[in-house]
Image (cartoon, grey):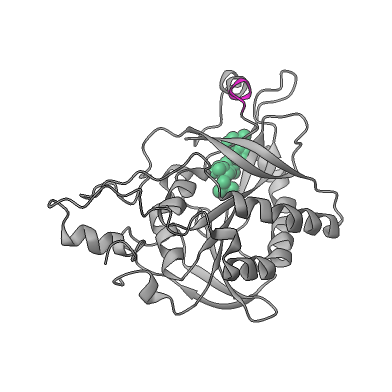
Amino acid sequence: MSANATSENEENVLVGVIGGSGLYHLDNLTYVKHVNPETPWGFPSSPITICSLPSGTRVAFLARHGPGHTISPSAVPSRANIAALKSLGVRAILAFSAVGSLREEIPPGHFILPTQIIDRTKGIRPASFFEGTSVVAHAMFGEPFSMKLVKWLEGPVRKALEDEGRGVQLHTDKCIVCMEGPQFSTRAESLMYRMWGGDLINMSVLPEAKLAREAEIGYALIATATDYDSWRPHSEAVTAAAVFKVLHDNASTSRHVAATILEDLHAAALDGDVLTEEAGSMKFSIMPRSEKRTDEDTAKLAYILPAYFS
Ligand SMILES: CSC[C@H]1O[C@H](OP(=O)(O)O)[C@H](O)[C@@H]1O
Ligand SMILES: Nc1ncnc2[nH]cnc12
């Protein structure tokens, strides 16, 4: 285990990609190597693949559920995933996720950049790096995604989808419900989420987005619709089989989008413009130092926030 994240930053990888269901590799990029950092929160879901873009720029790829999809959404080691990406120098995360649609106008196959989240996880997932330590922190989460990053993504993602030519449309400003799973929702729940203002549903965006915020990493989600969940009265409720039918095409389009936009995203992250909301955001979220803070906790938290815990 390393002392802190930045001292491990030999790769100088600024952008990390998290792949969800169906997206287990970015094999349209050049493979460089695998790394598997042990963090204070354990090992990530899978070894992280370092890939190279045509210019030589490196990006990191992590399969959320492991390469053979062996980790259920409730058991994803999100703290280790986010900490491991931070240890490589990652400052912006582009996460992909298969989602159910709660809106008629978002059919399976469409892509979405959500801007809000409703938390329907059940409190069984460790959701903070500060949990179990002697340090209390309250991160801002009113805007759960990095709005500058989301706004930046809109143009390049839309263009990449148009260039691909499969007619995949992009929706913006949507609200995603994150449920616990692993079972899908009942029809009553699905209808309730629509009444609450939910547009999409998945089992993965939390606590990933919260942990990225605590680690001061810009985080945006590209949601890829696979089904209409269970709210449509005359249609079958969602099944895994229905989801699998769409995963392959969605993954192929996701790889195309990633390959098309990552070079510019890396440049934007290097420039810093898309990440100004995150940089320094935890500084005033951490409660004042108490005499109860242990050296062990300080060292642990230095792994993700060396600026405040060294
Ligand atoms: C395979 S259907 C349910 C599963 O799909 C989504 O995974 P991911 O977000 O990693 O693409 C959803 O969150 C569930 O985990
Ligand atoms: N309907 C759904 N509910 C929750 N997670 C999903 N992932 C894909 N489709 C989903």
Residue lying at 13% horizontally and 51% vertically, measured from the top left: 292
Q: Is residue 234 above or below residue 63?
A: above
Residue lying at 31% horizontally and 50% vertically, measured from the top left: 286
Measured from the top left, where is residue 273 in percent x and y? 60, 62
Q: Quadrant of residue 55?
A: bottom right
Q: Is residue 156 above or below residue 239?
A: below
Q: Mainly helix, strand or loop, the magenta region?
A: helix
The span shown in magenta is 193-197
Measured from the top left, where is residue 156 in percent x and y? 75, 59
Residue 301 shows in this picture: yes
Quarter of the image with the C terminus is bottom left
Q: Is residue 243 above or below residue 214?
A: above
Pick the front one: 223 or 277: 277
Pick the front one: 152 or 303: 152
Measured from the top left, where is residue 179 in percent x and y? 51, 34
So how many labels did they put on this image? 0
Left-right relation of 142 to 302: right
Measured from the top left, where is residue 170 in percent x and y? 76, 46
- Is 86 inside the magenta-drawn segment? no
Residue lying at 40% horizontally and 45% vertically, measured from the top left: 139
Q: Is residue 243 above or below residue 92?
A: above
Q: Quadrant of residue 164?
A: bottom right
Left-right relation of 108 to 283: right
Left-right relation of 22 to 46: right
Residue 77 shows in this picture: no
Q: Quadrant of ligand 2?
A: top right
- Is 194 inside the magenta-drawn segment? yes
Left-right relation of 309 to 88: left
